[in-house]
Every structure is written in C-alpha cells, then in structure tokens.
Image (cartoon, grey):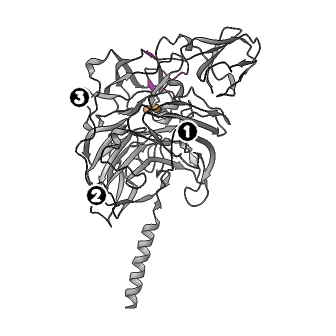
Amino acid sequence: MKYRVIYILFLIYLAGKAEAQYNQLTIPDTISGTTFDLTARDTFKQMMSGNQTITAGINGNWWGPTLMWNKGDVVHITVHNQLQDTTTIHWHGMHLPAIMDGGPHQTIPPYTDWSPYWQISNNAGLYWYHPHLHEEALHQVTSGLGGLIIVRDSTESSLPLPRTYGVDDIPLVLTDRRFDGSNQLVDAPYGDSMLVNGTMRAQYNIPAQVVRMRILNAATERSYNIGFSDNRTFYIIATDGGLVDAPIAVTRLLLSVGERIEILVDCSGQQGTSFDMKSYNANLPQGTPGDEPVNFAAPFGNALGDIDFNMLHLNVTAATSNPITAIPTSLVSNSFYSASSAQLTRTVTISDSAIAPPGPTFMLNRRFFDLNYIDYTVPLDHTEIWDIVSTSTFSHPFHIHDVQFYILSRNGVPAPSYEQGWKDVTLIKGGEEVKFIAKFSDYSDSLHPYMFHCHIAAHEDLGMMGQFVVGSSPAGLRNVVNNKMKLYPNPGTGKLYFEMKDNISIAEAVIMNPNGQAVLMSNPNAGKGVLDVSSLSNGVYFIKLLDTEGQSYIKSYLKE
Ligand code: C2O
Ligand code: CU
Ligand code: CU
C-alpha cells in the first residue's frame, strides 16, 4: 500500500515534469484602427533560464504587435526608430506606392520617425512587416524585429471560418535562433532552438472544433516541412496573398522563408487529447534550406538540421460556444491572369558565384545588388511573366515586392494545387525553372524602386537582390546618392532644413511632386539650406539637391 502511494506520487511527479518542459505560447497583441504607432528599440528578454538575452522589439521586447487592417482603409503608420542603428520597415506582401514600401531606400536613421500611409487594397490574408536595411537584414531580423499583419475584407468575413484571434484563429510565427554560451543571439543562418512566437518549447490550448492557424515562416534561412505528430490531414485555405478557391487537404507542407499559409485543423470531439505540430525536416531533398546536419561545416551545421523536431505542443480543450465544426467545401473564386494576357516575359537567372568561402554565394542576373542600379523598368499596368531560371545548387525563396503573382508552371508543368493561389514568395529549387505572372498596376514612380530578392537573410545581405521601377525611364535615378543628405523635420510642415555631409556644396535645391515636376526651387550655394514648404499641399515630395559638380542627391519628403 505504502509503495503504491509512493508509486502514484512518482507518476504525478513525472506528469508534472512533462508539463513543465513546455512554456505557454505567447500570442502577439493586436492593434486595430487606421493610425498605428510602432516603436523599435533595443531591449532584452528572458528567453531561457539564466542570463537575459539582448533583443530588439517593436512596442515590446521581441517581435511586434499584429496589425489588423481592413481592405479599403487608409492606414497611417509612424515608425519611431529608437534603435541605435538605422533601420527600415517593409510591409511584406502589400501593394502600395514604392516610397511607402519600406525597402532599403526608405531608411530611418536612429531617433527619427518615418510615417508612410496608403490605402489597403490587398485581399484578406496574412502579411508581415520586417526590417529591410541593405546588408543588415540578417542582424536586424535575428534581433527580433518584425510583426504580423492581418488584413480583413468583406468576402472573407462572410465565410464560415474561425476568426477569434488567439482562440480559434491562432497566429504562429515560426523561426529558429542560435544562442551563445551566455544566452546571447548569434547572427547565423540557422538556429539550434525552435521558437514559435518567440517561445521555446511552446504549448497552447486549442478548442475541440475547427481551428485556423495562420503560419508565417520568419526564419533567417530554414524551410519548415510542417505536419502533425498523428499525421492528421489539414486543410490549406490561404496562401501568401489570400484565400484559395477551396480548401486543399494535405498532411505535409514545406514552408520557406517569407511564405505564409493559413490552415484549418479539425479537432472536433478530441477534447482531452494532445498532439504536436512538427517540422519533418529529416531527409529533405538536397539543397533545401535546413537539410544541413549538425556536423555540417560551420556556420551551417545546426542542431535542427536534417531531423524531425517538435514546434508546438497542442492540448485540445472544451469547444467554444459558437464553434466552427466543418471544413467549408469552397471559399472564393479567384481570377488569375492567363499566360496569354502577358505583354512581356522577363528572365531572371539564379546562379552560384565562384567566391566567398565557406560556400558559394548567390546571384540574381549574374550580378550583386547595387542600390543605384535598376534592373527593370516595368511600364505601368503591364502584365508580365517572370521566368526564374536557376542553375544554383541550392534552393532559394524568391520574393517580389508590390505585387501578388500566380505560378504558371514549375519545370514546365502546373504547380502543385497548394501553390495555385496568390503568392509573393516561392521556393526555386536548384536547377528549376519557375514561371509566374503578375500585373504591375496603380503606382508608378520612376524614382523609387521595388525589390526582388532571395528571402534568405544572409543571401539578401550578400547581394542576392535586384530592383525595378514601375513607370517611365528611371533616368533620374542612376548615380543618385541619398546617404549624404540630412532632411529635417521629415515628415514636417513650415520649414524644411537640409544639410550635406562631407563638405558637399549645393548649387541647387528642387522640390518635386511624385510626377517629377518641380514645385519649389532655391539656390543655396552652401552645404546647408532651408526651404519654406508651407505653401505646398500635404503629401509626398522628392527633394533633389545638385552639388557644384552636377551630382544629384534625392530623398523623399512628406509634407504634413
Ligand atoms: Cu519580406 Cu523584400 O521582403
Ligand atoms: Cu517584401
Ligand atoms: Cu538564396
């Protein structure tokens, strides 16, 4: 009897220990409305026992709030940069004016603000925001900067889908990090610890009904081959740019960096059970990001490479009062562009360069990124096929700004059904040829480019990126330097001060409207000057300074 009690106590102890190995999943806060304040700052977080970890966060100490946007609304965002570093914030997946895009050209110096605004025209779906400073993406993303965006629209809202945030509609940000011996983050291609929403060994309670999971791969390099420990079927309802026509049943889904997927998981009648969301990364095809085992050459070998590992432990609890209990049979009817509507096909090559140990680095169109080189000028309203041809030995998640595309073919045959939706990132495997079609509408701006690049942070930083403008010839952009000019206050009203670094003397200062027409000019003939902008109507302008040698410097300015 006595031994029996001890044995039962021992079992209870074991059960308690099993529970204790999990941490409660953090669900990011939400902000809704039409004005948003985001403050990026250096901070720290208790990520594991022992030392706190130095991190950066947006309105917090890791990652940022989920922004809830409605299609049709005009959103005004102010990004306050309280980091000790310049940064940018890019709205990944959004269709918007190039100057609001937050790419490498829209830099926000330390202790300054940036205030983009535009009208949301994207479909309901999951998008995200993250830093995009050239050569600093790996470092700034590693530190924890970024956040989710959920767009809602009337089409999605009318469907019988789960949408109670954090209850039956669960945001899941998948990433992994490497820590040093004192618990500090290491800028590395792969981590040894899995994080979901910044939580290590995460668990979460989900109700016994149909649950929606909105999943982002926010890793720096790894692809996650998502599945569940009981091999259950789950249903894809949305790709990067919104809902698919009808749910697609799968048991595995390879999600690459930058890609999003929304799935339904049916837990009806399963109260009291538990299962795991896992990444089945053992035996991934060679060259898939994440297939490098632990003993692979540094810095690529990692504890999660080439194995199956747990991401999230799920406990099924009582159903909510108004549960969704069925997987819908159809969702929306998308109309994608047909190949015959394309006015032009562009070929983009992906290749391995010969340099940079410990491995090759990678190129687009056989060149490295240059902030002042425009690869393409896309006429406004053009429908184009982009033919991505890879001779690389590695797989690369290819991403394009401004548009959502539709994949016409993968190696000459239609893409698998789970890729037949709106996309802005797709994995191009070594040696593959992928054709997608997109339309470049609404925003033309010959001065401000959009990016296309590999979304693996280290590849992007090493120059696996190109840029295009939508509109007329980018003549004014070549040889333009913008890191020599200080403009303040920006945004501003009344007076606009400018100042040049390196004793550059300004012969002419011009304020242009977005169409490139001069609206104000002055001849300061010095390294500093002031323009009275009070007569200008509110909106976006470009300030162009010409130095005494004829070199031009251009920056954007928001008159408020
Ligand atoms: Cu997710 Cu160019 O970005
Ligand atoms: Cu993007
Ligand atoms: Cu790459």
In the image, taking residue 472 as reference, residue 134 lies left or right, namely: right
Q: Is residue 63 above or below residue 341?
A: below
Task: Residue at 24%, 42% (x, y): give it.
Answer: 330
* 1 vs 2, front mark: 1
Residue 47 appears in the picture as rendered? yes
- Region of the chain picked out in magenta, as a range: 354-380
In the image, taking residue 410 as reference, residue 373 lies left or right, namely: right
Task: Residue at 47%, 60% (x, y): give it.
Answer: 24
Magenta region's main secondary structure? loop
Q: Position of residue 428 (x, y in %)?
A: 35, 31
Q: Quadrant of residue 521?
A: top right
In the image, taking residue 172 as reference, residue 516 lies left or right, namely: right
For label 1, the residue is 35
Q: Secondary structure at mark 3?
A: loop
Please give the label number shown on residue 413.
3
Gap in angstroms between the C-alphas marked 2 and 3: 32 Å
Q: Is residue 521 above or below residue 188?
A: above
Q: Identify residue type, mark 3.
A: Val
Q: Position of residue 388 (x, y in %)?
A: 35, 24
> Can you say which quadrant of the picture contains the C terminus?
top right
